[in-house]
Image: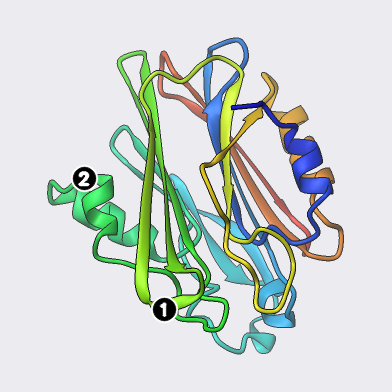
Amino acid sequence: MKMLSLENELKENSYPGRGIVIGKSPNGKYAVTAYFIMGRSENSRNRVFVTEGEGIRTEAFDPSKLVDPSLIIYAPVRVLGNDTIVTNGDQTDTIYDLMKEGQTFEQSLRTREFEPDGPNYTPRISGIMNVEGGEYNYSMSILKSNNGDPSCCNRYTFSYDKPVNGEAHFIHTYMHDGNPLPSFEGEPKLVSVLDDINEFTDLVWNSLNEDNKVSLFVRYIDIETGKYETKIVNKNQ
């Protein structure tokens, strides 16, 4: 698979929707993840990321303007032991709860499907990173309608058991802007990441469409120690 420029992938797409990047820093020291949200409506744009425990949640920037919280207010990131869960919806809680009961990442997502927001039927994208004893692996998932047909949910899981230094994978909800919005297609894209969390955060944030970007979360986890550093950027300040 050809390695793509994450910067170009973002700059050349005005509306990838929500996106997850997971990979490993070029120096091999960090497990890297980024999650961003975008919005076209006032309701979607009226959000910020805030810290909650070891993870984050979305919150209305102006509570008086919040119309329907059902698909926009959720916890995108939660930590369960050595696992960091990153998703674009309340399936974060599903994964967390069912894995706590002994089910796997993939089994947990068998209980969910794409979002009920026809005609878009937005895919549910999810990722999980396991950092333990100096070892690191990750998986990504997408649940999507069958080419816009909500009678069938197509489920795909991609697992990376030996991440390569400098390589990451990028999955997002929409191929591009449109009406209805076309769902992401194919495998997660192979992209590069950086050693420095500040430089990587700036690269992603500055590459997102200025009108549509809302919030960005970036975390670098030290693979040897499990300690992490987090950056949050909100357009609404």
Horizontal arrangement in the rendering, residue 205 relative to residue 216 (left or right): right
Q: Is residue 42 visible?
A: yes
Q: Which of 203 and 178 lies nearest the eye of the viewer?
A: 178
> Where is residue 166, by image quadrant?
top right
Q: Secondary structure at mark 1?
A: strand
* Circle 2: residue type: Thr
Q: Secondary structure at mark 2?
A: loop
Which mark is in front, 1 or 2? 1
Which of the numbered marks, if any, corresponds to residue 166? Answer: none
Residue at image position (46%, 64%) is: 89
Which of the numbered marks, if any, corresponds to residue 150? Answer: 1
Residue 111 lies, with reference to residue 116, above or below; the image says above
- Expressed as whole percent of the image width and height from the top left, the position of residue 128 reads 39, 41
User: Could you give the CA–CA distance between mark 1 and mark 2, rounded to whole angstroms?
Assistant: 25 Å
Residue pointed to by mark 2 = 104
Q: Is residue 32 visible?
A: no
- Expressed as whole percent of the image width and height from the top left, the position of residue 105 reads 28, 46
How many C-alpha atoms fall within 10 Å of the one at disc 2: few (<14), some, or many (≥20)?
Answer: some
